[in-house]
Amino acid sequence: MKWDTLEEEPCSLARTVAVIGDRWSLLILRECFLRIRRFDEFQSTLGITRHLLADRLKKLVRFGVLRRIPYQESPKRYEYILTQKGLDLYPIIMSIVHWGDIHMGDSRGRPMLHEHKTCKKVFDPVMVCSECGEPLTAKAVHVHPGPGARQSSPVHASAQERANRAVKSG
Amino acid sequence: MKWDTLEEEPCSLARTVAVIGDRWSLLILRECFLRIRRFDEFQSTLGITRHLLADRLKKLVRFGVLRRIPYQESPKRYEYILTQKGLDLYPIIMSIVHWGDIHMGDSRGRPMLHEHKTCKKVFDPVMVCSECGEPLTAKAVHVHPGPGARQSSPVHASAQERANRAVKSG
DNA sequence: TCCATAAAGTTCTTTTTTAGAACTGTCAAC
DNA sequence: GTTGACAGTTCTAAAAAAGAACTTTATGGA
């Protein structure tokens, strides 16, 4: 599969994975939510190679997740800040962190705690149904094709599979 | 950064990324939640190379996300099913899908719709605070170190950065 | 003037991963 | 006794990442 075709798949997961589905992008976004903004800050905090960092930042800007804005002239320097589209990634980041808290912890306890400014309490994120407010589980959800589904084919068949079908039917 | 040290970082995001932070793992897990279980099913649905699929399945089993169980003898055949640890990834998958629905859609509408069996309605996932039940936003959350945080260092400084520090202080 | 430092990259070479295709082993069915 | 399914493994070529040095544009001293 070519990764540049992934974002065209009729699958919202595949399309999102095209944007943030690699290790560095997720770590970069984590830093963004921790108020990191500048190239060298990302580089020294993450230990990512400068080449890859430049590449990933470019990609995130291209997809509208980050915006590159100048913070000084002569020499021109830029920083990277989350757009609204980027801020909307928060539930993804939080659910990833929460799963790690529950399933990948060591004996020392959680690396970080999250406090809700609204209620002043340390909290966990909970995913609920927008309609009834009940917590969601995989077993309580039924999935069916929507208007953007591909006609009569697997949910996100690959380029390779489409080629296979073309051969079989041709 | 070596990826095999990622899971030891004092950061729940990094630890989770060590397990599911690559494109194929996320796509494989999506298939798992759509009831795909067998090697060739994964392979033909996703178009992943057999080599990588074997590798990723092995990794997910090693981390306890999937369990490899025989479904027939002679010849022995196995299928891969989600453990509870794997099922707990559901909020991550759902929030990824939802972000794609909102931000990566095309004119045709959503590829898939989700119906909550409990209330019988098509829904969106919403992330709320476990303590007060209000929807969460990045700006309303304050992050501070927990008991498992690294002492006086960046949240998830890399092996490279630790080496740098060692050089500076040595 | 010359040197050092800083930020934000780019360039280069080596190493690791991935793609793509074919091959293996074990059985069942025809 | 040949075909086909399943669950992989092996091979080579291509792509991506690691690791380190270099570039550019400017500031701040000695």
Image (tube, coloured by chain):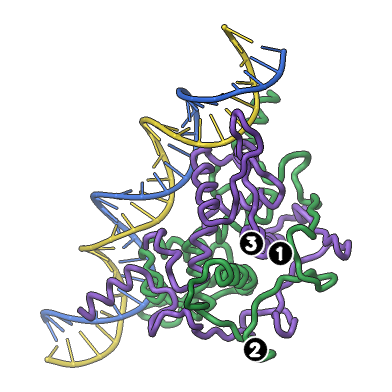
Chain colours: A green, B purple, C blue, D yellow
Task: Characterize the local packing of mark 2: few (<14), some (14-19) or many (20 or more) Cα atoms within 10 angstroms.
Answer: some
Q: Which residue is mark 2?
A: A121
Label 3 – label 1 distance at C-alpha: 20 Å
Label 2: which secondary element: strand
Disc 1: which residue: B102
Q: Position of residue A167 (x, y in %)?
A: 64, 26
Give the label, 1 or 2, closer to the camera. 2
Given residues C28 and B24, the one toward you in this image is C28
Which mark identifies residue A60? none
Residue D4 found in image quarter: top right
x, y percent for residue D2: 59, 10
Q: How many marks?
A: 3
Dot placed on the residue nearer the N-terminal end, 3 or 1: 3
Q: Amino acid at mark 1?
A: Ile
Return the residue at label 3: B89
Mark 3 is on which residue type?
A: Leu
